[in-house]
Image: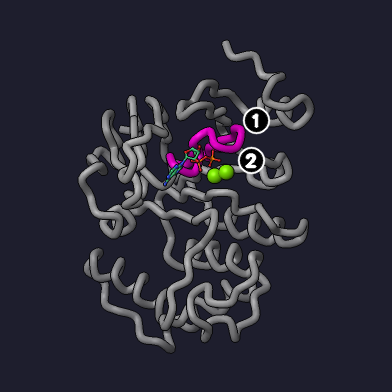
Amino acid sequence: SPLLEVRGLTASVKETGQQILAGVDLTIREGEIHAIMGKNGSGKSTLTKVLVGHPHYEVTGGTILFKGEDLVDMEPEDRSLAGLFMSFQAPIEIPGVGNFDFLLMAVNARREKSGLPALGPLEFYSIVSPKVDALKMDPKFLDRNVNEGFSGGERKRNEILQLSVIGADLALLDEIDSGLDVDAIEDVANAVNGLLTPQNSVLMITHYQRLLDLIKPSYVHIMENGKIIKTGDSSIATQINEGGFKSIALV
Ligand code: ADP
Ligand code: MG
Ligand code: MG
């Protein structure tokens, strides 16, 4: 069975009942890279948040199967332990928790689930340190609190550091390129490409061709009004880049 299979997914804002997702169908197999593009407000971020179980949204219909298991009634923490990772478009601050401790806790929770012994701080430091270097981050940054006082670019790099340390079967990357300069986008893309194996999959949301030139998608989807209205190969992205969304024939 596919890694992720979404069928007829509808979801609303919990507080108001306003429907945002209007019947999303999406299939992601092992080793595939998918990109979702679409105008602002089309529901891209909501889709990723609903997949990870964000508490602001309620699934009102349809199914989400991850590794054949129904995600809809699973807690966000369990979805994450099951191998789903999300980078937030606006990453959250976690006051009072240091980056290093946060990462170590996350890694050890997964090791425990797999029946592996916990890593100690020294052993873990030797694993994290080269990844910090690869992302051209200041090692001091491991001592700082999660996302507290980080610049936009530091937050994005930190999200990718989390992904590269924790690992994921499916990484949902929401606008990891927004607010990054060209060099930073390249560092982040290299880090993501370094994680790809025939088993790992990525779903990325982006407005920019540049990211798709660096992380080559197997499929590009166009989202509009809470639905995926077109799926194709990376030539769709090129078309949008040149002629805007109106240049895509919706057939
Ligand atoms: P995109 O990521 O494609 O720009 P979003 O998923 O962020 O779009 O939002 C889709 C639509 O749903 C927008 O009109 C947005 O204002 C609305 N929306 C999303 N989340 C909420 C929320 N928690 N409360 C109210 N409206 C929301
Ligand atoms: Mg948006
Ligand atoms: Mg968004």
The magenta stretch spans which residues? Answer: 31-47
Q: Is residue 81 above or below residue 52?
A: below
Q: Is residue 140 above or below residue 233?
A: below
Q: Which residue bears the numbered disc 2? A: 216
Q: Position of residue 241 (x, y in %)?
A: 75, 32
Instruction: Tell me which amino acid carries mark 2.
Output: Lys
- Circle 1/circle 2 CB separation < 8 Å: yes
Q: Residue at x 67, y 25 (%)?
A: 245
Q: Is residue 124 visible?
A: no
Q: Position of residue 76 (x, y in %)?
A: 30, 55
Q: Mark 1 and mark 2: span between their CA atoms?
A: 8 Å
- Label 1 sits on a secondary structure element that is loop
Instruction: Tell me which amino acid carries mark 1.
Output: Ser
Q: Is residue 115 visible?
A: yes
Q: Is residue 118 magenta?
A: no
Q: Residue at x 23, y 41 (%)?
A: 69
Q: Is residue 204 above or below residue 187?
A: above
- Within 10 Å of disc 2 (Cα), the crowding (few <14, some 14-19, many 20+) is some
The N terminus lies in which quarter of the figure? Answer: top left
Tell whether circle 1 marks a residue whose Cβ is less than 8 angstroms from ligand 1.
no
Q: Which residue bears the numbered disc 1? A: 234
Where on the picture, by quarter, is residue 9?
Answer: top left
Foreground residue among 76 and 195: 76
Q: Position of residue 244 (x, y in %)?
A: 73, 27
Q: Earlier in the sequence, mark 1 or mark 2?
A: 2
